[in-house]
Image (cartoon, rainbow, N blue to C red):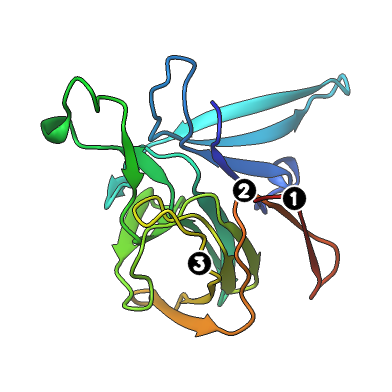
Amino acid sequence: LRYPAVCAVRGRTESEKCQYVIHGGKTPNNELSDKIYVMGIVCKPSKKITFKCTEKELVGDVPEARYGHTINTVHSRGKSMSVIFGGRSYIPIGQRTTEKWNSVVDCMPHVFLVDFEFGCCTSYILPELQDGLSFHVSIARNDTIYILGGHSLENNIRPPNLYRLKIDLPLGSPSVSCTILPGGISVSSALVTQTGDKEFVMVGGY
């Protein structure tokens, strides 16, 4: 896969403490994948370390095949869920022509909340998120995700937006809200990593 979304997750047991969620991306045949995998490190008694990768089946509002998106894990009230946002996909089959067979479009700006424990996915439409974005950066801290920059294919712009997604996971239905924050920058295809509890570093990009 090329351009998949990847994030680290906390496992429940010692053997699962180092796991990664992988979603989407392009295949070597230039097709798009909608599959979700969970990959972890398996430590055997012989001290030989191997990787175990499991495909996860989802029901509900399953996100379409895409690339250039992000996935993060949030933690709220003792529960964890993954959040998928953004990306690009091929235009629907019914709208394709010979000249535009592999043309891509921005995915709808829906927020997908994925519960791996029960294998279900729910999408949310938020009024603050009007345009599809690809190759943005996102960072998660506890129950909050920050989304910065990105490229809008439809408008061919890199809007200097900074969004804050707040995910609340009570006993009932989850609650997802979005706030537009000041201080965004116009950037896409950058890399971001966490260097401290409240500090992140971003490098590169357009």
Give how far apart the Cα atoms at labels 1 and 2 are. Answer: 7 Å
Marked residue nearer the N-terminal end (3 or 1)? 3
Residue sticking out furthest to the top: 29
Q: Position of residue 187 (x, y in %)?
A: 62, 59
Q: Which mark is residue 189?
A: 2
Q: Nearer the viewer, residue 98 or 80?
A: 98
Badge 3 vs badge 1, beta-carbon distance below 8 Å: no
Q: Residues within 10 Å of mark 3 (few under 14, many from 20)?
A: some
Q: Residues within 10 Å of mark 2 (few under 14, many from 20)?
A: some
Give how far apart the Cα atoms at labels 3 and 1 are. Answer: 17 Å
Depth-wise, is mark 3 or mark 2 nearer the camera? 3
Q: Secondary structure at mark 1?
A: loop
Marked residue nearer the N-terminal end (1 or 2)? 2
Callout 2, which amino acid?
Answer: Ser
Badge 3 vs badge 2, beta-carbon distance below 8 Å: no
Badge 1 vs badge 2, beta-carbon distance below 8 Å: yes
Query: What residue is drawn where x is 47% and y is 31%?
Result: 55
Q: Residue 48's image quarter?
A: top right
The residue at which mark 1 appears reads as 204
Query: What residue is drawn where x is 16% and y is 25%?
Result: 97
Give how far apart the Cα atoms at labels 3 and 2 are. Answer: 13 Å
Callout 3, which amino acid?
Answer: Pro
The residue at which mark 3 appears reads as 159
Q: Secondary structure at mark 3?
A: loop
